[in-house]
Image: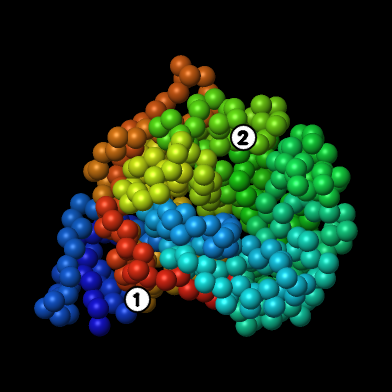
């Protein structure tokens, strides 16, 4: 067996950081404990003294099927960025392409070679389906381990009748629904059917959000609103938080270096929202208040929103390619969160891995370092200083707080294979595989 022994790392055990050794082999964590000996004389040993061992993170909503349409170098850069930011599992909405059967669509997707290195799963999407068959859902749930739905809201008028059925089915199986809310002004180009039923007003945007949340709570369905970035959206979500059914994903709000402008404009991560300046962006206090709660997640940075020009052959994690925000996700959260004492390292592990793994029905296979779990492990060096700075947008220039990034990923193991060593990315070490999931816990 190909073992790797990691010595003296700080890991979360029962909610407490402890110094432990971790032995991995056969794609799993075999043992965690004090003073573990090499099982074989040739077993590689990594000394992680003064460093943290983190479970791999889960990206709950990314369209990775499109990557197979790009060139090889684009796919390589994406895989590299995902691994460097500590993401070892990705989940994509199944948006119908060839049929009106969930079963047929899923079987077709499973035969594809996406070329991604992270393990992957799917959400079932109701959007654009003319037939909503319960037997399809039951098959995908019982036989294929599909344990979540994706709903882009608002829907066409003809699809409204399917919403109560969807939410009741999801509630019965304890499977969450991810709600991708259109922002004011979205859907105008290329989606005429959406713009007909979606008035580009703030009042309508908020009333639509309120409506879908009311639908969900009435049905007893667990929902997660994606990419929340406005105070007005947060207020609606908070009013229903006592139900235990409403979750939300905060839009990654940080900027790095000069990858985006400090002010909200066409170069901002908020570009594309014409009414952005008519609503109130979440404040720093709002963001950390939310991220300390169990029912909030942080979204992965949107790709291709940074950098001017692409270094297609770059394998160094601080080069300014189009994935600079994604690659530095952990550094930003560590710098602004842990180093600035907005939350603890235990909280950070919970935020990036434990919560999402539980919500997506992947726990304890993913999201935790314990015996028997997949050996998806990040070795994090907290003492590394970066020549990059992060800041929040949407504030006056004289009020901007900018911090040099701290810490970096030094090693990443995916299913026990070392795919990143701090400088080079080894694409041939691992291949992503389909994941069967359980109900939300």
Circle 2 residue: 271
Judge by depth and name the residue closer to the eye, 287 or 91: 91
Q: Is 395 located above or below residue 366 in the figure?
A: above
Q: Residues within 10 Å of mark 1 (few under 14, many from 20)?
A: some
Residue 338 horizontal/vertical position (percent): 36, 42
Residue 162 horizontal/vertical position (percent): 83, 64
Q: Residue at x 52, y 72 (%)?
A: 113
Judge by depth and name the residue closer to the eye, 115 or 325: 115
Q: Residue at x 27, y 46 (%)?
A: 382
Q: Is 150 located above or below residue 204 in the figure?
A: below
Total numbered badges shown on the rendered structure: 2
Quarter of the image containing the N terminus? bottom left
Q: Earlier in the sequence, mark 2 or mark 1?
A: 1
Q: Residue furthest top?
A: 398
Determine which quarter of the picture holds residue 112. bottom right
Q: Is 38 located above or below residue 157 in the figure?
A: below
Residue 79 horizontal/vertical position (percent): 43, 58
Residue 331 horizontal/vertical position (percent): 36, 44
Judge by depth and name the residue closer to the eye, 286 or 186: 186
Q: Residues within 10 Å of mark 2 (few under 14, many from 20)?
A: few
Circle 1 residue: 27
Q: Secondary structure at mark 2?
A: loop
């Amino acid at each position: 067996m190909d073992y790797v022994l990691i010595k003296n790392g700080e890991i979360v055990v029962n909610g407490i950081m402890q110094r432990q050794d971790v032995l991995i082999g056969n794609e799993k964590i075999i043992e965690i404990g004090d003073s573990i000996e090499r099982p074989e004389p040739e077993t590689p040993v990594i000394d992680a003294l003064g460093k943290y061992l983190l479970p791999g993170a889960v990206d709950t909503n990314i369209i990775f099927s499109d990557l197979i349409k790009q060139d090889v170098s684009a796919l390589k850069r994406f895989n590299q960025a995902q691994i460097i930011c500590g993401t070892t599992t990705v989940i994509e909405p199944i948006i119908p392409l060839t049929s009106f059967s969930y079963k047929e669509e899923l079987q077709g997707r499973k035969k594809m070679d996406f070329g991604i290195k992270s393990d992957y799963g799917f959400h079932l999407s109701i959007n654009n389906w003319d037939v909503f068959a319960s037997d399809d859902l039951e098959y995908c749930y019982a036989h294929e381990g599909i344990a979540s739905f994706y709903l882009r809201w608002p829907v066409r008028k003809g699809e409204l009748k399917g919403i109560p059925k969807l939410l009741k089915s999801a509630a019965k199986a304890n499977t969450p629904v991810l709600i991708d809310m259109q922002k004011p002004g979205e859907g105008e180009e290329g989606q005429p059917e959406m713009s007909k039923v979606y008035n580009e007003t703030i009042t309508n945007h908020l009333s639509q959000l309120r409506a879908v949340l009311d639908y969900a709570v009435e049905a007893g369905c667990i929902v997660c609103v994606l990419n929340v970035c406005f105070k007005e959206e947060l207020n609606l979500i908070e009013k229903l938080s006592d139900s235990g059914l409403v979750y939300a994903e905060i839009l990654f709000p940080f900027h790095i270096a000069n990858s985006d402008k400090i002010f909200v404009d066409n170069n901002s991560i908020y570009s594309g929202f014409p009414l952005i300046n008519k609503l109130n962006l979440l404040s720093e206090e709002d963001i950390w208040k939310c991220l300390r709660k169990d029912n909030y997640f942080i979204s992965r940075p949107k790709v291709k929103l940074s950098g001017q020009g692409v270094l297609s052959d770059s394998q160094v994690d601080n080069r300014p390619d189009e994935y600079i925000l994604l690659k530095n996700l952990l550094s930003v959260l560590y710098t602004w969160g842990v180093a600035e004492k907005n939350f603890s390292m235990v909280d950070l592990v919970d935020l990036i891995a434990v919560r999402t793994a539980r919500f997506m029905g992947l726990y304890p296979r993913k999201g935790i370092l314990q015996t028997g779990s997949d050996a998806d492990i990040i070795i994090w060096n907290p003492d590394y200083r970066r020549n990059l700075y992060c800041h929040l947008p949407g504030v006056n220039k004289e009020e901007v707080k900018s911090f040099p990034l701290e810490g970096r990923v030094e090693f990443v193991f995916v299913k026990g294979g070392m795919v990143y060593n701090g400088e080079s990315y080894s694409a041939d070490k691992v291949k992503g595989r389909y994941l069967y999931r359980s109900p939300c816990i």
